[in-house]
Image (cartoon, rainbow, N blue to C red):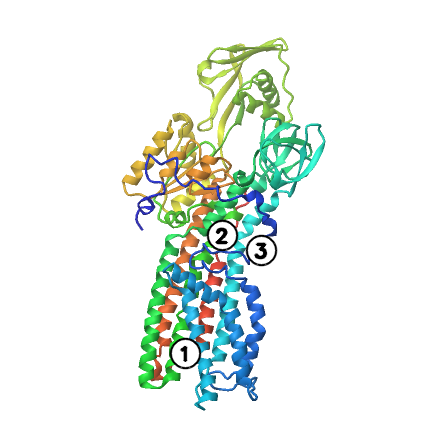
Amino acid sequence: MGNKHSNHSSHKHTADNKMKHSKMDHSTMDHSKMDHSEMDHSEMDHGAMGGHAHHHHGSFKEIFLKSLPLGIIIMILSPMMGISLPFQFTFQYSDILVVLLSTILYIYGGKPFYMGSIDEFKEKAPGMMALVTLGISVSYFYSVYAVIAKYVTGEHVMEFFFEFASLILIMLLGHWIEMKAVGEAGDAQKALAELVPKDAHVVLEDDSIETRPVADLQVGDLIRVQAGENVPADGTIQRGESRVNESLVTGESKPIEKNPGDEVIGGSTNGAGVLYVEIKQTGDKSFISQVQTLISQAQSQPSRAENLAHKVAAWLFYIAVIVALIALVLWMVIADVPTAVIFTVTTLVIACPHALGLAIPLVTARSTSLGASRGLLVKDRDALELTTKADVMVLDKTGTLTTGEFKVLDVELFNDKYTKDEIVALLAGIEGGSSHPIAQSIISYAEQQGIRPVSFDSIDVISGAGVEGQANGHRYQLISQKAYGRNLDMDIPKGATLSVLVENDEAIGAVALGDELKPTSKDLIQALKKNNIQPIMATGDNEKAAQGAAEILGIDYLASQSPQDKYELVEKLKAEGKKVIMVGDGVNDAPSLALADVGIAVGAGTQVALDSADVILTQSDPGDIESFIELAQKTTRKMKENLAWGAGYNFIAIPIAAGILAPIGITLSPAIGAVLMSVSTVVVAINAMFLRLDPKSSVD
């Protein structure tokens, strides 16, 4: 497939543009003025979704339902291929009535197709719409000629009103089904939009409250968010304290404590307290709008597979027209004009690349929707295919494989005079006056255990070693293992930092603290190895911390890596001809995320993550990387299956429709051609809908 960057010269490919690529242009989008909750996705214009740029010529649902009675009457009054079926009947001048009804149906029901074909020819890309227009136009105008000939010359010419009506109805129904299926992929956007309330409570200068539409909010407005309400827009808390549930926005399952100065995201749910929030972002700059834009971009951006499908569809148009003309001439020579028209119309009908046009968009629509429901936001659809070819995955450590927070991993006793709870109480007490992350983690641990810290009379800092203090007439020290200077009889967790609690120069206890691995990190590494993707951990942490995590995970690692070091690592791996996936937090790792064949940002909400990565995992869970690999593999497989079916079906069907097998008694009528074409459409649609992800493990 070649290197991604060579094929997208305007996309990320050099150090010079590493921080600039893939910028989203919001200038033309104003989400604040869009009422997403009222959108009917089954009727929307999915024009950008490959091969269907003309589906905005009216609502296919409305046109089909209004055309259905006309079509049924025409099929009842018109014989199929000149053969009257049991449910059909005619009366004097019924063919005149059929001509009138067919003209209405051609003008109204056929409008989306011939208007679409005009657009295709303007774009110099005739395809599906042009083929359908040819099919219905040939059958309609020839049938009108047949009726005129009957009354003017008395000549009996076979007409194809039955085939014409059935073709239009089938094509309208097929497009309606397509629009409904494709529109379902917009559900993720709609669900996000519904998180934002329609109105906000704005606090005025006299402290009175004015209710305004969210669309009218301005940056700097102060709003009041009551308990249980959703936050209307991104902002910073000015007054009030509460716990805010951001699970539907960021994937963080636990409500987060929020205080003045903390940021809140529009769409998150306020807990028990009342918050006064100053608006910082509105409209298209808000987090939810940017996520909606990502989903929309993922749906509209043509992938390599789609581009291939479009090229095949274009070739099909020319092949179908040429074969149809050849069939017309040959069958006029071999048989007669009506027979020639039958084969010509059938060729044009069955060559319609409807299944081919749907093959890729339906899979990507389903994939995008499925991914969004799991917090997997795919900006660049080529990332899906490239992931299936990946050789190496470079992973950041802190915040990606680990929680990024110090936690108490173990507490050890060295003196029988004290219980474990008493040691923890002393540890929390002596660290009570410190704001250091290690101190705060010990205090939090004591709180979680329901242990009350010992009250110290005095606490002093021991420069370069730790702290010491006086409590209950005893002198205690909490110092580093290096400062203690003696070996301890305990198993220290790999990569952990050890602090020793000392009384009278003897260790009475120790606490091991570390940046804990996330529960799904080990499963991710196993999945990567199973898929023949080599995991490499590249971290800015020191050698000891990096080694500890790497040994637990069983992977290669590089410690003390700067952003430039990571960038050069990705550059080196790519120079060796390897396809590289980079996983990071989207901030320090932005250059390497931009350079990698596939950049995956773990955690969303930062602009640099949105700009630098191809894929964003909103839940910051390593298990979601495994889910993305699964999504990439299954999506790529479904694309290939649908493309093979859509293209293969057409290339086989065209010569049969043209009558190549007529000498042995095998022919296809226009109606059968339309039915087979619709069956092929249903096959690719069903195949796309069967795209599923395995259920997430219970560790989530």
Residue 575 pos. (x, y %)? 27, 39
Q: Secondary structure at mark 2?
A: loop
Q: Earlier in the sequence, mark 1 or mark 2?
A: 1
Q: Amino acid at mark 3?
A: Asp
Q: Nearer the viewer, residue 625 or 547?
A: 625
Q: Residue furthest left?
A: 576
Q: Residues within 10 Å of mark 2 (few under 14, many from 20)?
A: some
Q: Is residue 394 visible?
A: no
Q: Is residue 496 left or right of residue 126?
A: right
Depth check: give the residue in front, 191 or 436.
191
Indicate the quadrant containing the C terminus: top left, top right, bottom left or bottom right.
Answer: top right
N-terminal of the two: label 3 or label 1?
3
Residue with the mark numbered 1: 668
Question: Dot 3 corresponds to which residue?
Answer: 40
Give the foreground label among 3 and 1: 3
Q: Amino acid at mark 2?
A: Leu
The image quarter containing residue 124 is: bottom left
Indicate which disc, 3 or 2, sits on the residue closer to the N terminus. 3
Task: Name the residue beneath numbered marker 2.
Answer: 693
Q: Tell which tag, 1 or 2, sits nearer the viewer.
A: 1
Q: Amino acid at mark 1?
A: Leu
Specify the quadrant of the image occupied by residue 306.
Answer: bottom left
Q: CA distance from mark 1 to mark 2?
A: 40 Å
From the top left corner, tell me how far across and down residue 404 is, in percent: 49, 30
Residues tagged 3 and 1 counted as in contact (Cβ below 8 A): no
Identify which residue, 577 or 169, lies in the foreground: 169
**367 to the left or right of 566:** right
Which type of secondary structure does the marked residue at label 1 adopt?
Answer: loop
Dot 1, crowdedness within 10 Å: few (<14), some or many (≥20)? Answer: many
Label 3 vs label 2: CA separation? 26 Å
Q: Is residue 398 visible?
A: yes
